[in-house]
Amino acid sequence: MAVTPLYKQFADQLAASIRDGVLRPGERVASVRIASQQHKVSVTTVVRAYELLESRGLIESHPQSGYFVREPAQPADKPAPARRSARQDNPAWQQSTEVDVSRLVLATLKTIQQDGTVPLGSPYPNPALFPSQRVAQYAGKITRNASQSSVFDDLPPGHPDLLRQIARRYLENGLKVDPEEIVVTVGATEAINLCLQAVARPGDTIAVETPTFYAMLHAIERLGMRALEIPTDPQRGIDVGALEALMETQPVAACMVMPNFQNPLGFQMPDAEKERLVRLAERHQMPLIENGVYSELYYGNAHPSSLKNYDREGLVLHCSSFSKSLTSAYRIGWAMPGRYRAQVEKLKFLNTLATPTAPQRAIAEYLTQGGYERHLRRVRRAFAQQRDLMRHFVLRFFPQGTQVSEPEGGYVLWVELPSGVDAMELYRRSLALGITVAPGRIFAATNRYSHFIRLNYSYPWSREIEQALKLVGKLVQELAD
Amino acid sequence: MAVTPLYKQFADQLAASIRDGVLRPGERVASVRIASQQHKVSVTTVVRAYELLESRGLIESHPQSGYFVREPAQPADKPAPARRSARQDNPAWQQSTEVDVSRLVLATLKTIQQDGTVPLGSPYPNPALFPSQRVAQYAGKITRNASQSSVFDDLPPGHPDLLRQIARRYLENGLKVDPEEIVVTVGATEAINLCLQAVARPGDTIAVETPTFYAMLHAIERLGMRALEIPTDPQRGIDVGALEALMETQPVAACMVMPNFQNPLGFQMPDAEKERLVRLAERHQMPLIENGVYSELYYGNAHPSSLKNYDREGLVLHCSSFSKSLTSAYRIGWAMPGRYRAQVEKLKFLNTLATPTAPQRAIAEYLTQGGYERHLRRVRRAFAQQRDLMRHFVLRFFPQGTQVSEPEGGYVLWVELPSGVDAMELYRRSLALGITVAPGRIFAATNRYSHFIRLNYSYPWSREIEQALKLVGKLVQELAD
């Protein structure tokens, strides 16, 4: 017996009024109290109905003045008028843009969360590959034996054992790091947020790669900054020359990049380009925020260098985490903010006060015991093989005109579909079949990549994945016709 | 053999140049690169030396232009000139203020962190009172048995089991809550930050109690807002009439309060005052951010009401956590943001992406198994007794003119020392004896409460605590003479 909850009924009724033009774009919707009185429903019902309509993009809330009917959204693959006119004069990437991409990202991530879907759209690596159980055992033991005063250990910058182990790991990979340079955070997400806030202010322009990992855009959005999208080569990374040229025309407060195995493109910036970018930053005294979460997942013979390797002046704010290489269960990340260390430590304290101690100590214990490098070698081998398989089957199942990236590390593939294909529609139709893909639009502040998708190949190749890919290929074919 | 590290030597050298006037306030310090070349030391040494000088308040960094010698700081209990002149016209609380209190707070919390100090200055409850072990056992079991896909469970709003248990707990305490109203966060700290960001913008004025819990001031500071300090009665809480009068003279974007067992005053706002505050908020459509972390720690016969109990329009953003009542090991908090729920959920996603799943499930399991109410009864009884002992011995050991609060819940005492006593100096001298106290200055955005301290009475009364209090009393006497 399917009963529509009251708030949905009320929302549908209101949605109909909007569709029918009874309520017009820009008009104020009745206040929660008034609506509750008029319709004889509870305040909670009204609030939930309004939230539902907001999530559907039909109304929006303006702080302290209530809800308003939204302007109709632009169709997915039609550029917004503002951008189109900008385009007549300049390539779109010369304009900085306000950022509002997070709703779409959260919605797609939630679909991936549903049990039983084939997670081709997932941003996460297959958790079965990671030694989470062992780390959990250490965590359990540590918590049981914790001295009662250990609550005090977890103030920033973080637990000394973990700081030492992180520094040691960098040293093994050729980067000399002092444990005191590090601040532990809630995943790389918090690290990126804190670093950006430490170096720039609301309204500032931040240069990013395009396409870029949406967490970068989220940080910009959260802090009310503007994104300046810099052309990014699928093999060489951000176009340093283009960035420099743009910096002559407008102030750029900071630049955020992912030089190794960028999500979604998968490139490893050549060392010379990394150094060139850092020198450019030095000349302009521009902070560089580096996201290094995939650096351990290389397929080549040696650990790639980081921007931090070339940093002589403390301008590189390096962010990373264990979520992509060891365990995502605890969301332990960190920042090495160079000359901005004191500010980042302070912001960490303001933002979430502290990162829990037990998981920090458990990861430190795992790193002390050894086995991390062996685990990583196994994962790298698996990902390299799975990349080849995924590329092979995409090229086989998808229509002509499809192009795929050649990642040198990490676990995602960037797929350009024939230009007429609407990837948002593909996302929706795939989801209806129980398969997720990540639509290209979530990787840009502007309305780009409407015919791109990102695919996750961290799961071992299986008949189920092959079938899913075949089905997605068919949908692409239908949408291309 | 005590060797002074190179960076400290370099910092001391530079500090001497500043003291001697070689480098004057406002002057730029040599860039990191130049200094490194001039002094033949590494960049890291320079950076660490500059950070040290910054933490000592001698230099300050200006983003993208380097380090500058600071203007000499105002002595602790002398009002800053700007404020003094403002005072000539109005009571100081009529002026909103930029906020920068976090450095002092972080520094004092770090001293509390040191092993072996008597933690009278601690903001944390005695962890020995809490069933952290049992929750840790659940967490261990859950992690060991976790399905490999559980990484997806932890996207906002939070784990469904925990959301249900939190809602059930509110229901037991007389507040009807739908699990869907709740968003799980990294402690109440993150909840407060997200709620404030959801309802106000940089530059906005936020009304706060005075004295107020510094986490409120931190949120305001982090978001670049201004604090408007409202007189707050030690028994009745924030002066609603004064708030209303001030709202007539200037726009107030939101108000942040702690109606139950406020830190540091300890009052429980009378129900009539709570309702009056909510009605005022309704008339002005002003969001109210409520910090409820101590609500479970009441000494009376019944759980106190929350502002949320009087909230008809979804204007109350209620924040809380388990850190003060069950376990602080996992930093699990939550927000019930009323009509701002969608924005808060989105901001949670942007800020830290997710809260780890295992601790959420472990706490849910503890709440399901029962025993929480029994544990709380024991804690409440202990705190009520310890309040009486602490009050008794403060009045006995401290000089005449000392006044102490009468908290009705929680575990901190607010102590007014004779008016000439400099609490910052008391803090420093106590620390030298291995005793921490929380200086009053950290509880205000303006330079107030210079002769107040906050004392923690969550630890069972002992000879050590009694001796420590006696020593502090002697120091107060010395400073009063």
Image (spheres, coloured by chain):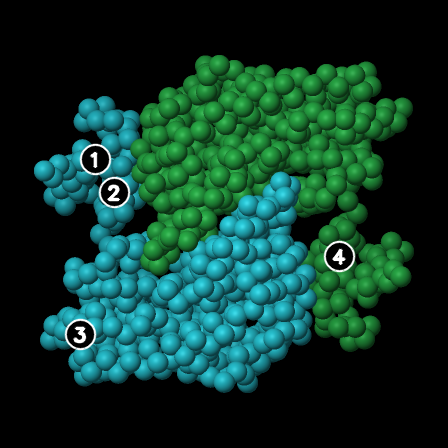
Chain colours: A green, B cyan
What residue type is disc 4 on?
Answer: Leu
Look at discs 4 and 3 and give the one toward the viewer. Answer: 3
Q: How much space separates mark 4 and mark 1, taking CA atoms?
A: 56 Å
**Callouts 4 and 1 in the same chain:** no
Q: Quadrant of the N terminus of chain B?
A: top left
At numbered mark 3, what does the secondary structure look like: helix, strand or loop? helix
What residue type is disc 1 on?
Answer: Tyr
At numbered mark 2, what does the secondary structure look like: helix, strand or loop? helix
Instruction: Identify whether A30 is placed above or below B391.
Output: above
* Residue A150 percent across, percent down from the top left: 35, 54
Q: To which residue does mark 3 refer?
A: B470
What residue type is disc 2 on?
Answer: Leu
Q: Which mark is residue B52?
A: 2
Q: Chain of mark 2?
A: B
- Between disc 1 and disc 2, whose residue precedes? 1
Residue A33 in view of the camera? yes
